Image (cartoon, rainbow, N blue to C red):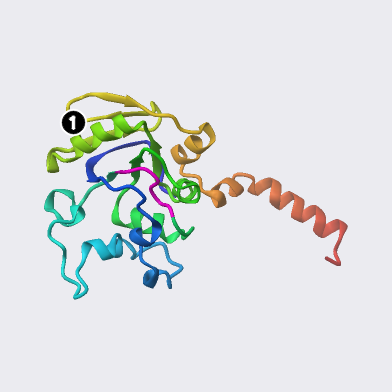
Amino acid sequence: MEKFTTLTGVAAPLPMINVDTDMIIPKQFLKTIKRTGLGKNLFDEMRYTPDGEEVADFVLNKQAYRSARILVSGANFGCGSSREHAPWAIADFGIRCVIAASFADIFYNNCFKNGILPIILPQEQVDKLLDDANRGANAVVTVDLDKQTITGPDGGCIHFEVDSFRKHCLLNGLDDIGLTLQREEKISAFEERRRVSSPWM
């Protein structure tokens, strides 16, 4: 998993509450088990018409936000079904940080496991960042995970909280497999001892 240390990029505003996982990646795109290729279908039903044409006024179709790295949205982001394809699609688009007043629990946990930093802030601070994000290409925001700060385009700084273990995993690029492989020598030693002591297994 790619490490998350400091992220600087354009923040895209999506001022909607209850953005569910079917909005993030509709059910017809869940056939794949690959984590790549889903970015083009992120928010598919809002980004495209039924004929596949881009909806011009959807935020990620606007030129200023086509390469957004940060998404600022409303409360209860990621609610609905527990599909892991939702953070896969967000990451594949290029977004590494989602900021909202609250998240659905399963989506929130899945973000950390897929290299995305979900940040929970009080609504008034989310509203300030939404205002910053409405500046288009000038909506450049820096997220520093080590310092736990968000710096806006005017230089204003917001502090955020994050669980220390999850912070450690993101800073070091450790998903569940990576955490397990940190103990690879002990695992191998145990397997060798068991092979000798219990050759019938």
Of helix, strand and loop, which one carries label 1?
Answer: loop
Left or right, 174 with reference to 157? right
Q: Nearer the viewer, residue 155 or 170?
A: 155
The boundaries of the magenta stretch are 73-79
Residue 118, horizontal then vertical, whole percent: 40, 42
Question: Farthest front residue?
Answer: 17
User: In which image quadrant can residue 135 be found?
Assistant: top left
Q: Looking at the image, which residue is at 36% across and 66% down? A: 26
Q: Type of residue at label 1?
A: Pro
Q: Looking at the image, which residue is at 38% across and 55% down? A: 20
Q: Nearer the viewer, residue 135 or 155?
A: 135
As drawn, 22 above or below 147: below
Local crowd size for mark 1, using a 10 Å CA cut-off: few (<14), some (14–19), many (≥20): some
* Residue behind mark 1: 153
Residue 11, horizontal then vertical, whole percent: 23, 42
Left or right, 104 with reference to 11? right
- State yes or no: residue 75 in magenta: yes
As drawn, 148 above or below 39: above
Q: Looking at the image, which residue is at 25% across and 45% down? A: 15
- State yes or no: residue 168 in magenta: no
Q: Quadrant of the C terminus?
A: bottom right
Residue 90, horizontal then vertical, whole percent: 34, 54
Chief secondary structure of the magenta span?
loop
